[in-house]
């Protein structure tokens, strides 16, 4: 193809006023990181980025661009001079490169970022489209619903030609909004919620409640693998994963709490632990994959009762999403095939037949008095094992042992 560079647009970052420099600095760092190891030249301008391909595989570059939060859109472009004859010739070459075998409708659009350019935008469009039509027999004009568009952007430093705008991740550079702690299960929802939070600038650490050997070590491995997928979107290609030993609390709940309230009480314990760990890790919010009404613990009444144990803000990026839309995002983020692996975590391994969908705070507090949960929560926080997961991590828990805590103790002892 004729394209020799990629034009990257910022979107909402341009609206940040006095803070714009800080946002752009973070974005530049993120782009530098994601392009590391590729034979490209990155040119930063005040309102966009140009990535010179230097014969690098464009698909590799695009794959990495799609991991960068803070980018609104991008286009494959070719650059020529602002001489109208050069624009005509380059436009024809581009259209011959794009349209080769069958009759195709097209439309030409011109934008003059350089307002001093002597030819009006509409006149450029007429001159170029007329020339292209006269010399390309497979093209005809359709200004309403064209199959291909020829976009001409005239700037001080040259003219840029492209056919398509590709939607990027959007949002803000990861890390600019502070740090949050994601309650990461092995399901479909929470990884998607974490990536969406990262897209909006939140640096994410993950907490997982593991109950090995009540649950299989494969369920914990699935969480490690999902963390690897999420790490691709982070600002340094890695993410911290905190494994909480939840077996004792899990057993205490099953032994002491009425079946209809087991999930409610379990979630309240998780929120207490997550809030305590978040404070230790300098996280200023919790994040989870809850969607209103999706399961018994995610009715508004349940959320209110569960949420009452913490004063920490809780971000729920998927709160109003339908499941089919969450699945689409999970597939887009390459998490879905992992998430549907049949290994159950502590929230799904013992599902009550009739969970309460409208629990009461006073009842939950009364039931919790049946065991010394406060000391167990403190102990769980103290005994949490933390590990940094790289996007290319080869950590294989099942090969190393049967219980997560023992496996991570052995790994951490070697560091």
Image (cartoon, helix red, strand yellow):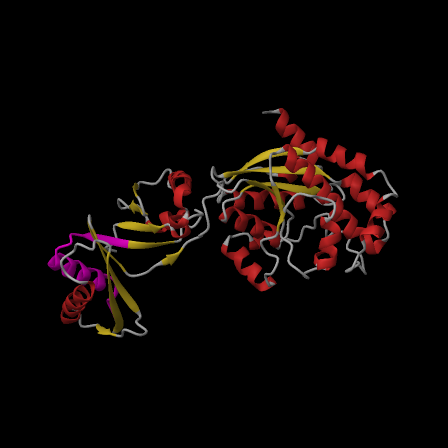
Instruction: Examine the structure image and report whether residue 125 is included in the region drawn in magenta.
Output: no
State the image quarter where residue 240 is shown: top right
Task: Give the side of residue 391 with respect to residue 157, left or right.
Answer: right
> Is 344 on the left-hand or right-hand side of 227?
right
Q: Position of residue 354 (x, y in %)?
A: 81, 61
Say which residue appears at 59% left-offset and 61% top-offset. Answer: 321
In the image, residue 134 lies at what x, y percent? 14, 71
Q: Residue at x 15, y 52 (%)?
A: 81
Main secondary-structure element of the magenta-colored stretch: helix
Is 335 on the left-hand or right-hand side of 212? Answer: left
Which residue is at 64% across, 41% downward?
A: 207
Of residue 300 and residue 76, the one placed in the foreground of this image is 300
Q: Is residue 398 visible?
A: yes
Of 51 and 117, which appears nearest the observer? 117
Q: Position of residue 11 (x, y in %)?
A: 39, 52
Residue 367: % across, % down: 86, 48
As drawn, 331 above or below 243: below
Give, as a single range, the part of the protein colored magenta.
Answer: 77-101
């Amino acid at each position: 193809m004729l394209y020799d560079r990629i034009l990257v647009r910022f979107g909402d970052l341009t609206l940040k006023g006095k803070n714009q420099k800080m946002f752009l600095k973070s974005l530049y760092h993120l782009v530098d990181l994601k392009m590391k190891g590729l034979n490209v030249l990155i040119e930063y301008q005040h309102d966009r980025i140009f990535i010179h391909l230097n014969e690098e595989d464009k698909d590799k570059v695009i794959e990495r661009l799609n991991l960068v939060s803070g980018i609104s859109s991008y286009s494959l472009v070719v650059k020529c001079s602002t001489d109208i004859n050069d624009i005509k010739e380059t436009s024809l070459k581009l259209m011959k490169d794009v349209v080769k075998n069958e009759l195709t409708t097209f439309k030409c659009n011109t934008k003059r970022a350089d307002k001093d350019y002597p030819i009006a935008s509409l006149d450029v469009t007429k001159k170029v489209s007329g020339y292209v039509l006269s010399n390309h027999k497979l093209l005809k004009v359709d200004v309403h619903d064209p199959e291909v568009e020829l976009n001409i952007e005239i700037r001080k430093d040259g003219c840029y030609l492209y056919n398509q705008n590709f939607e990027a991740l959007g949002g803000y550079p990861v890390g600019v909004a502070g740090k949050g702690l994601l309650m990461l299960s092995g399901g479909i929802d929470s990884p998607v919620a974490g990536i969406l939070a990262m897209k909006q600038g939140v640096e994410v650490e993950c907490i997982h409640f593991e109950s090995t050997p009540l649950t299989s070590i494969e369920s914990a491995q699935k969480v490690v693998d999902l963390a690897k997928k999420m790490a691709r979107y982070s600002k340094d290609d890695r993410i911290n994963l905190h494994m909480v030993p939840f077996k004792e609390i899990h057993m205490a709940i099953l032994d002491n709490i009425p079946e209809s309230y087991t999930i409610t009480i379990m979630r309240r314990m998780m929120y207490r632990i997550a809030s305590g760990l978040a404070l230790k890790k300098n996280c200023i919010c919790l994040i989870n994959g809850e969607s209103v009404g999706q399961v018994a613990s995610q009715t508004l009444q349940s959320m209110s009762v569960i949420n009452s144990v913490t004063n920490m803000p809780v971000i729920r990026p998927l709160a109003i999403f339908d499941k089919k839309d969450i699945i689409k995002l999970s597939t887009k983020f390459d998490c879905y095939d992992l998430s549907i692996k049949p290994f159950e975590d502590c929230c799904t391994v013992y599902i009550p037949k009739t969970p309460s969908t409208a629990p009461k705070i006073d009842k939950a507090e009364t039931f919790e008095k049946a065991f010394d949960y406060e000391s167990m929560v403190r102990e769980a926080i103290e005994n949490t094992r933390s590990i940094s997961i790289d996007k290319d991590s080869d950590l294989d828990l099942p090969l190393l042992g049967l219980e997560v805590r023992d496996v991570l103790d052995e790994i951490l002892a070697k560091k």
